Image (cartoon, rainbow, N blue to C red):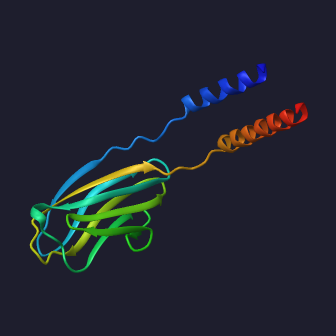
């Protein structure tokens, strides 16, 4: 019984010590006209992360025609557009996007397209969140928990 109390206390302490990545929305406003290329933001990412967000059109206007949202690493000339590692979903108020498993570094978030309906402004909101990466301690805790459950089941079986 003394061992079970220690294990329960260790589990509570481990849960309390776990931290999640804090993500804050960032808003950027840009003006559009005809065909456009707009740098939305320079983003610095500290570890493997996901970049998600939404482009909101002012006054209910839409962008029609070719549209591309890119996340580029200017140092290595690597560009990821929404067609490969991310996605863009059109909605009545704009586009939702996601770039998943982006490595640490500094990136430029930009949009290019053809403004057929004359939208004059777009507001980009995006969030950078750390991608969940299991740590070795997580697996060790899982195995320890399964071992305790197996031990308790075997002990109960012997008593009965």
Splitting the image into 4 quarters, where does residue 141 fall?
A: top right
Q: Is residue 9 above or below residue 77?
A: above
The outermost residue toward the top is 2
In front here: 25 or 32? 25
Picture coordinates of residue 72, whole percent (x, y): 37, 64
Instruction: Identify which residue is drawn at 55% across, 29% down.
Output: 16
Q: Is residue 117 left or right of residue 150?
A: left
Splitting the image into 4 quarters, where does residue 109 fall?
A: bottom left
Q: Is residue 1 above or below residue 42?
A: above
The outermost residue toward the front is 160
Q: Is residue 36 above or below residue 42?
A: below
Picture coordinates of residue 159, whole percent (x, y): 89, 30
The outermost residue toward the bottom is 65
Instruction: Identify which residue is drawn at 78% across, 23% down.
Output: 3
Q: Is residue 50 left or right of residue 10?
A: left
Picture coordinates of residue 150, whole percent (x, y): 80, 40
How many numbered discs?
0
Quadrant of the frame with the C terminus: top right
Quadrant of the frame with the N terminus: top right
In front here: 70 or 54? 54
Instruction: Identify which residue is drawn at 72% across, 22% down.
Output: 6
Picture coordinates of residue 18, whole percent (x, y): 55, 34
Splitting the image into 4 quarters, where does residue 91 fall?
A: bottom left
Q: Is residue 43 visible?
A: yes
Q: Is residue 157 left or right of residue 7?
A: right
Q: Is residue 74 visible?
A: no
């Amino acid at each position: 019984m003394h061992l079970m109390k220690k294990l329960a206390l260790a589990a509570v302490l481990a849960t309390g010590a776990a931290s999640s990545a804090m993500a804050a929305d960032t808003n950027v406003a840009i003006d559009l006209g005809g065909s456009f290329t707009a740098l939305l933001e320079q983003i610095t990412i500290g570890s493997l992360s996901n970049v998600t967000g939404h482009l909101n059109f002012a006054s209910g206007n839409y962008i029609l025609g070719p549209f591309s949202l890119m996340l580029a690493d200017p140092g290595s000339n690597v560009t990821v557009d929404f067609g490969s590692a991310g996605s863009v979903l059109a909605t009545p108020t704009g586009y939702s996007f996601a770039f998943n498993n982006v490595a640490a570094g500094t990136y430029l978030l930009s949009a290019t397209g053809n403004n057929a309906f004359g939208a004059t402004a777009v507001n980009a909101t995006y969030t950078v969140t750390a991608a969940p990466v299991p740590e070795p301690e997580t697996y060790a805790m899982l195995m320890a928990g399964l071992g305790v459950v197996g031990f308790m089941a075997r002990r109960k079986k012997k008593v009965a």
